[in-house]
Amino acid sequence: MIQSTAVNLGLGGEDSSAIGVTTAEWIAFEQAYYRLAFAMSPVTAETLAATQAVMPGGGEASTLFNRIFGYSPALRFTRGFAVVAIVIAAFVVIAECQVAVYGLETDATKFFWQKNILQSLLPWAYGAFGSCAYLLRSAHYYIYQRSFDLRRKPEYFNLVLLGAISGGAIILFVNYLVNEGDDTVLHLSSAALGFVAGYSTDFLFNTIERVVAAIFPKTDSDPKVSQRPQKPVANKPRPVQDNDGSRDDPGNVEQAVNGNQTSKPRRSSKKPAIPAAQTGAATEKDGH
């Protein structure tokens, strides 16, 4: 249906001529396209166009820029994003070396401010570098799956900024990690914590939630707690006592109270009485 509609609209090739489609054919085309998009999700026409590589000889010249950055728009963006990661990594290496050089000075007050500024910026840089590592790993997976969407490019740069903030802020809350398996304590440096927080930004938010829960425990006066719907407590029905002193099953009380419903017969431990007529008939039949 999709191919025939494209041919009728003059989009099937150079020899196809536009003859138009009817309303019923256009509705059928939309339904077929909807079923195709639902079956191929998250792959769409935009992601296929963004990840389609135009190789040399297919309409694009083989230049040095194309050989370095790739032939598809998605691959070009990810390799350009890799350049950003390389720049951040270069800053980290230079800053680490400079801090080591400042530490060799005999006069501790000579480069005091420069050393402290670089040491303060390193966790932020490690957070941005960890975020770049995670995004590059995810981007190449999306390119392989043909589901990379170029409309999400601003999200990548926002995640780098968020990773830098996470790397700089995580040292305010955590200076070691505890393994839940054997309760061993893993002491990590501020740079390592910054990289971990940048690679997984949820690590920072989970830590903040734990700190908030420890400092401000939830009480009954908390609006979030008070607004929670509570389960109604069902009253236990009282058993109904018969004239013979036995009690009905609580499950049948409701049926016994409502007169419009037939009460469920209750099992009795007494054996049913056999009518005299049947007893006599059975005696004569047995010959007794």
Image (spheres, grey):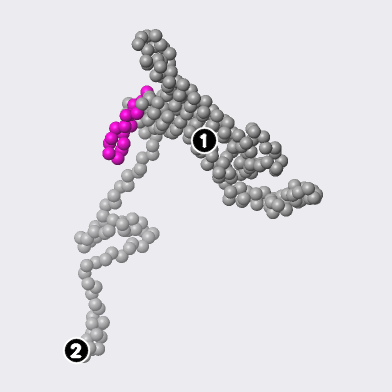
In the rendered image, the residue lying farthest to the left is 288
Q: Nearer the viewer, mark 2 or mark 1?
A: 1
**Amino acid on which disc 1 is placed:** Leu
Tell me what residue is drawn at x 45 percent, y 27 percent.
Answer: 127
Residue under the image location 43 percent in, 20 percent down: 97
Quarter holding the C terminus?
bottom left
| Viewer-nearest residue: 130 or 87 | 87
Amino acid, disc 2: His
Give percent across and percent down for residue 155: 54, 32
Mark 1 neighbour density, 10 Å: few (under 14) some (14–19) many (20 or more): some
Mark 2 to mark 1: distance in Å?
99 Å
Q: From what the image shows, is residue 282 above or below residue 196?
A: below
Q: Quadrant of the N terminus?
A: bottom right
Residue 4 picture location, percent across and down: 72, 53
The one nearer the camera, 78 or 209, is: 78
The residue range painted magenta reads 172-188
Provide residue 24's location: percent of width, then percent of height: 72, 52
Magenta stretch encompasses residue 183: yes
The residue carrying mark 1 is 136
Secondary structure beneath dot 2 equals loop
Residue 265: quadrant of the picture: bottom left
The extreme bottom residue here reads 287
